[in-house]
Image (cartoon, rainbow, N blue to C red):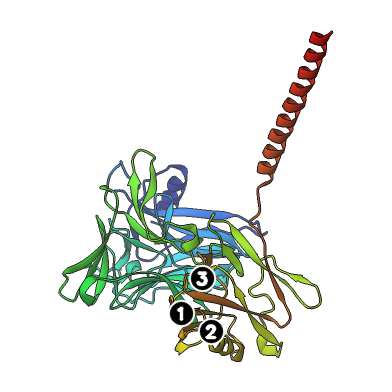
């Protein structure tokens, strides 16, 4: 049987859909070699099982994967729908290895990922009642006993994708991790809403939400063919985030680059998975549309906050997690108001019925606070309003003046504010210069022709 499994791996690599079974028996193991030297971008993958319901749409495949990850190689068990990764054992915590990546379903019924010398890096923790590993038609990876009862399933460990037929209970969530950032996104199911959050440190800020009408409570959500259904304790649908297309939904995904939530279907025309619904349709409504301390403008471009300090040093480039943001070390600070901007981030710690001056002082008194938003409606900026305190400067976008709010950033005392204009692409400048040059040449040529022709007529 070991030889059969290894040959199955080789066939799966050579053909698109593979010919493997949807089962992985007890007491079997598969090994994947890991390169001795690190190569950035390397991915080694052996497909072990597949499930294809029809030949029109892509099916599910299970793979043992070794890939380059921040100077080391990680080993994980993954599920794919076509070319889309929909589940991974290493989503939250990587198992790093060298020389070899091993998947074994032990005689005791425990599914394990191992490295050299049988060092275990991930396991299901299941017992000897397990008889096999299996991929179901829904994409659920399961360990079952001889009576076909599920003892472990990947659906109980959601990552950043929710598949058709999958359910999520209240207080569960999807999570995605943007690269080169200490913040991460979550899609959370709560009793009164489903919402998207930007998580930074110990705080989280919402930037999109959907609530059932009439204050009805949610017990769980399920991805159906027409969209995401919100259900109560009696399994009755109380609301739905519907798809724009008639094609059935295949999965819901939380993007790790944008933090946007989308419903996806398979298009036979393009032979790709396409979004039929997106929670956010404007670039400036995305939480990290710009780098920290960047402002998303009306033209969907990013403008950096530039500060000229009292030492005449320009501090900018939107690359810092904060412009002189380490105020807990005793640096003297002041609040600088940014004209015509607001924040899309909600649910920050709040104080109500305070003035803008008091709001600024509240942020100054908290060394971890880096920005504040004072919302005062249409009564004037000196009136009492709501004060939100932030520990991250993100999700800032340009708004019309007089919007009834004031956004303030904590800076080193004595700094002056300069807002740079969005950069213009070089090719636009070249085209404009060429056009202007041609116009000047044509005008000068026309004048020369006119004077020469007139002189000839006079002669």
Q: Find disc 2 in the rendering and name its residue.
A: 356
- Residue at screen point 60% across, 81% down: 370
**CB contact under 8 Å: marks 1 and 3:** no
Q: Find disc 3 in the rendering and name its residue.
A: 342
Front-lying residue, 287 or 62: 287
Distance, label 2 to label 1, CA atoms, is 8 Å
Front-lying residue, 296 or 416: 416
Residue furthest front as drawn: 458
Front-lying residue, 201 or 389: 389
Which image quarter is the C terminus in?
top right
Distance, label 2 to label 3, CA atoms, is 14 Å
Q: Find disc 1 in the rendering and name its residue.
A: 376
Circle 2 — which element?
Answer: helix
Q: Is residue 391 visible?
A: yes
**CB contact under 8 Å: marks 2 and 1:** yes
- Residue at screen point 46% across, 79% down: 376
Front-lying residue, 426 or 384: 384
Mark 2: give few (<14), some (14-19) or many (20+) Cα within 10 Å: many
Residue 453 coordinates in the image, percent (x, y)? 78, 13
């Amino acid at each position: 049987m070991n030889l059969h499994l290894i040959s199955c791996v080789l066939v799966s690599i050579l053909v698109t859909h593979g010919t493997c079974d949807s089962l992985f028996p007890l007491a079997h193991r598969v090994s994947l070699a890991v390169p001795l030297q690190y190569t950035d971008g390397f991915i080694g993958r052996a497909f072990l099982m597949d499930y294809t319901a029809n030949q029109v749409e892509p099916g599910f495949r299970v793979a043992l994967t070794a890939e380059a990850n921040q100077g080391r190689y990680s080993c994980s068990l993954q599920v794919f729908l076509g070319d889309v990764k929909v589940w991974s054992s290493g989503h939250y915590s990587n198992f790093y290895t060298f020389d070899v990546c091993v998947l074994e379903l032990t005689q005791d019924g425990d599914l394990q990922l191992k490295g050299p010398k049988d060092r275990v890096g991930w396991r299901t923790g299941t017992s000897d009642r397990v008889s096999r590993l299996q991929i179901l038609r829904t994409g659920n990876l399961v360990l079952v006993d001889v009576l076909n009862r599920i003892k472990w399933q990947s659906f109980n460990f959601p990552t950043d994708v929710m598949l058709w037929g999958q359910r999520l209970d209240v207080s569960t969530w999807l999570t995605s991790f943007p690269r080169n950032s200490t913040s991460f996104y979550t899609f959370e199911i709560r009793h009164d809403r489903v919402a998207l959050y930007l998580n930074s440190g110990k705080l989280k800020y919402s930037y999109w939400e959907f609530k059932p009408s009439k204050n009805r409570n949610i017990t769980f959500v399920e991805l159906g063919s027409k969209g995401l259904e919100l259900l109560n304790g009696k399994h009755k649908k109380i609301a739905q985030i519907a798809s724009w297309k008639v094609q059935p939904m295949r999965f819901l995904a939380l993007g790790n680059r944008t933090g946007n939530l989308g419903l996806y279907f398979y298009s036979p025309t393009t032979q790709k998975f396409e979004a039929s619904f997106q929670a956010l349709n404007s670039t400036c409504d995305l939480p990290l549309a710009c780098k920290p301390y960047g402002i998303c403008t009306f033209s969907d471009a990013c403008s950096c906050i530039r500060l000229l300090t009292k030492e005449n040093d320009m501090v900018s480039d939107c690359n810092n997690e904060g412009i002189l943001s380490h105020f807990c070390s005793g640096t003297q600070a002041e609040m600088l108001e940014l004209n015509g901007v607001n924040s899309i981030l909600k649910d920050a710690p709040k104080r109500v019925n305070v003035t803008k001056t008091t709001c600024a002082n509240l942020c100054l008194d908290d060394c971890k606070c880096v920005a504040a938003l004072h919302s005062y409606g249409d009564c004037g900026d000196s009136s009492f309003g709501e004060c939100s305190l932030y520990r991250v400067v993100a999700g800032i976008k340009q708004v019309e003046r007089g919007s009834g709010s004031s956004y303030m950033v904590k800076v080193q005392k004595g700094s002056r504010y300069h807002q740079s204009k969005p950069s213009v692409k070089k090719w636009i400048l070249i085209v404009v210069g060429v056009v202007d040059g041609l116009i000047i040449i044509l005008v000068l040529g026309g004048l020369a022709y006119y004077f020469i022709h007139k002189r000839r007529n006079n002669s």
